[in-house]
Amino acid sequence: MPGPVTQRTGQPLSASVASRVLEDDRRYLLHSWSAQKSRRPIVIAGGQGAMFWDAEGRRYLDFASQLVNVNLGFGHPRVVRAIQEQAAEVCYVAPEFASGPRSALARAVAEVTPGDLNRVFFTTGGATANEAAIRMARLATGRQKVITRRRSYHGATAGALSVSGDPRRRGAEPGVWGTVVAEDPFCYRCPFGLEYPACGIRCADHIGEIIEFEDPDTVAAVIVETITGSNARIVPPPEYYPRLREICDRYGVLLICDEVMAGFGRTGRWFAIDHYGVVPDMMTLGKGITSGYVPLGAVAVSDRVASFFESNVLLTGATYSGHPLACAAGVATLAAYHEEGLIERARVLGERLIARLAEIGERHPAVGDVRGKGLFACIELVRDRATREPLVPWTPRGAQEKHPAISATLRAMLERGVYAYAKWNMIMLAPPLVITEAELEGGLDAIDAALAVADEHAGRT
Ligand SMILES: Cc1ncc(COP(=O)(O)O)c(C=O)c1O
């Protein structure tokens, strides 16, 4: 039998162990969002901080925080210790009981979420958090419809995928009834052909028009990724959320902010909505809540929503809701964010990231736009800066199958020791909050050099 396949020494795995991992992966595993035969995964042997290394000991800077979740980087001793200690104490306690780490994490989350988001319901991940939020919105309002935005992803379960605009929703279609799609606050590709600020934030008012047209008495909630993650790192203008809050209040519609990706410091504030001074009715959480060390999701709800469930049954649940190991990891993760000043660090490093990307973008004709907030950014590649024609088309297929221009650019980054992923024509960047300044600058130098490959593909060198 092969030995353990992860270790923390940075030493390579033996060739036989590595090839066994790959063989078993190819033969026994099914991987998400991909046709299996095209997969050629890197075998990850271990990691520390913002670095991980493969079976041959090649080191990579993780400019994606894996799946935008490993905010504390690899091997954070405090989180590892918390999991070990909790495992030794008690691994599982059914949801109906009270448990130390569960209560402690609920309090820790309530302390950092904005306004009166004071009660927390735990789930098993981001998708189930969105399922629970939608369920609660429907129960609390007695209405059914949910308005979502076109370029959104809320998770892979049937309900969450049905309210996602992302083409991956094809997997759940025809989907759950009652989703109404609205346009995005996407200034670089404004769906209304307008320009900020002369646009008057048409994209927010448009949601009010949809609510009117659908009949407000049928609309339970508007769900938004506060700053859109997978589908383009869309940062709405400052007036957008205050206006959307007003519109939701006018019609008694609940505002759900999905902060699964953007939450827990990723954008340089605890939550992306904090940039706008707005308090949603519910906020869905995942990923950074445990820095990915153990799966967990949560819904933080306002006092008003919570009070509905004081005397009405909360008709949802799961065996692993508030799993103690995950909650212990969450308590340690939040303590690390606080004590290591990582939210402020993400703000400072994020400003550097966005400023340098803008400067790098100037040099590369294939770069149409760079945008983001904090350590949450993307580089959008185009054929022509004037027309903004995407370097690869935004087709449903293109979301899963990498175009050769994008594969070649990512490969050039990997050869220079930087891992990031891409969607359509966008290179997505989300380094861990613990990345050092030197690592950030070194990674950006590598990206700068690799973008020459995108320039070639765009027909300009
Ligand atoms: C904004 C957003 N919401 C929800 C999800 C789903 O989270 P999970 O994969 O943990 O179910 C994701 C996953 O990437 C996400 O980015």
Image: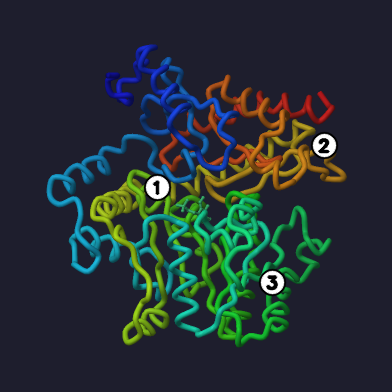
Occupied quadrant, residue 96: bottom left
Q: Amino acid at mark 3?
A: Ala
Name the residue nearer the viewer: 250 or 358.
250
Viewer-closest of 85 and 398: 398
Q: Quadrant of the N terminus?
A: top left
Please name the residue shown 50% across and 64% down the image. 274
As measured in the structure, the alpha-carbon distance from the residue carrying label 1 to the one carrying label 2 is: 37 Å
The three-letter amino acid code for the residue at tag 1 is: Leu
Q: Nearer the viewer, mark 1 or mark 2?
A: 2
Provide the residue designation for mark 3. Answer: 204
Question: What is the secondary structure assignment of the residue under circle 3?
Answer: helix
Q: Which residue is mark 2?
A: 383
- Which residue appears farthest toward the front when viewing the image? 27
Callout 2 environment at 10 Å: few (<14), some (14 to 19), or many (20+)?
many
Residue identifier under label 1: 342
Q: Marks 2 and 1: in contact by CB < 8 Å?
A: no
Residue most toward the left?
89
Q: Is residue 186 left or right of residue 147?
A: right
Mark 2 lies on a secondary structure that is strand
**At which x and y percent is residue 63?**
52, 35
Q: Position of residue 141 (x, y in %)?
A: 50, 84
Q: Is mark 2 within 8 Å of ligand 1?
A: no
Separation of residues labelled 1 and 3 (CA atoms):
32 Å
Going from N to C along the chain, the mark reached first, 2 or 3, is 3
Q: Are marks 2 and 3 in contact (CB under 8 Å)?
A: no
